[in-house]
Amino acid sequence: MDNIINIIKNSTPLIDLRAPVEFIKGAFPSSVNIPILNNNQRAQVGTKYKNKGSNAAERLGFNLLKNERNEKVQVWKKFINKNPTTYLYCMRGGKRSQIAKSWLSDDGINVPIINGGYKALRNTAIGILNSVKEDEKKWVILAGRTGTGKTDILKDLKSAIDLENLAMHKGSAFGGLLQEQPTTINFENNLASEYIKHNSNILFLEDESQRIGKLIIPNIWYRKMKESKIIIIDLSLEERIINIAKEYVYDPLENGLSKKNLNKLLQSSLLKIRKRLGLMLYNDISIKIQNILINSYEISHEEWIEELLVNYYDPMYDYQLETKKNRCLLRSNKSEVINFLIQIEANQSF
């Protein structure tokens, strides 16, 4: 297990020999999928194994690959030449790893296999995530109303882990506008990888609900977050409106997203919170977004963003902050909060 922990910690290059359908469900950040069997071949071998046993399945596998061996070896060699510390793995460190290692050995290249394969890597990742209940790190949660720029502040701190970046989602109903989130397994594997590399005695995290888009923060992490000290940043409504408009409207448009597609994305996100907004507020904001982006009305985006903040996000977040005030180390403006965070990081204590 110690060897696998070091492999994850050091971002050791990995060749994942599993079929693409297996890889897409979950892998590790330093792995590349160069499969020995494609999806169709894997399915055929699996059926043969089920009906005729392991020997028949192995013969079929070799038969399917008889004209592909050289091509596969060359692709593996190209990666290994660029990454000499590479390890191989399949699902459990079995036949596929042994065959690939043997073929490479015949070509004069000796590559180690991860004993236990992906299963061992995955179990190690789960162990890393669960280890937070015994660690002695001091967790500090940066909190504040929507639009206070918490994520940007944490990006400048070496002791922070950016959960939203790992989840590829900004946390709110509008947070998944422009990218597909990873699978739950990939999110957890990536989080474990970040955590095992975290060398500070202080861990900064952003205040989150347990769900980030479609993903769930592991229970043991979320429980610890709820028990940790918090720092609250205060920012004026006007500044927060500017931040949100830039992040969710103006930046996407400047990056080439059409007004039509932005309207679809914003309307879809708004629809997710329709019940909590109430029909009247939902309709009002929905119509304003469409009038600006589609009908070219002279209305500012800041207007509907303010409605959303004042009538929905702020009351909800203020209630949540009230329940956390007994854990608060500091509540202040952006400048004082940043200076305090820098001081905590430098001193490794609070």
Image (cartoon, rainbow, N blue to C red):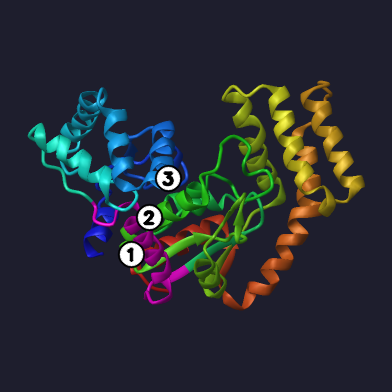
Picture quadrant of residue 109: top left
Query: What amino acid is at disc 3?
Result: Asn
x and y percentages locating residue 59 in the rendered image: 28, 37
Look at the numbered disc 2 and give the secondary structure of its residue: helix
**Distance (Cα) linking label 3 and label 1:** 53 Å
Name the residue furthest front.
52
Residue at 54% in and 75% down: 227
Q: What residue is pinned by disc 3?
A: 51
Q: Please name the amino acid that badge 2 sits on.
A: Glu
Q: 349 or 22, which is in the foreground?
A: 22
Q: Distance between the residues labelled 2 and 3?
A: 43 Å
Q: What residue lies at 44% left-to-right and 41% top-to-bottom?
A: 47
* Observer-nearest of 120 and 153: 120
Q: Position of residue 346 (x, y in %)?
A: 34, 64
Looking at the rendering, which quadrant does residue 327 occupy? bottom right
Label 1 or label 2, whichever lies nearer to me, is 2
Among the two numbered marks 3 and 1 on one chain, the one whose residue lies closer to the N terminus: 3
| Screen quadrant of the N terminus | bottom left
Give the left or right position of residue 70, taking residue 185 as reference. left
For badge 1, the amino acid type reads Ser
Which numbered dot is residue 194?
A: 2
Bin the neighbour count of mark 3 within 10 Å (Cα to Cα): few under 14, some 14-19, many 20 and up.
few
Give the mark nearest the N terminus, 2 or 3: 3
Q: What range of the chain is rendered magenta?
A: 114-139
Question: Badges 1 and 2: C-beta atoms under 8 Å apart?
Answer: no
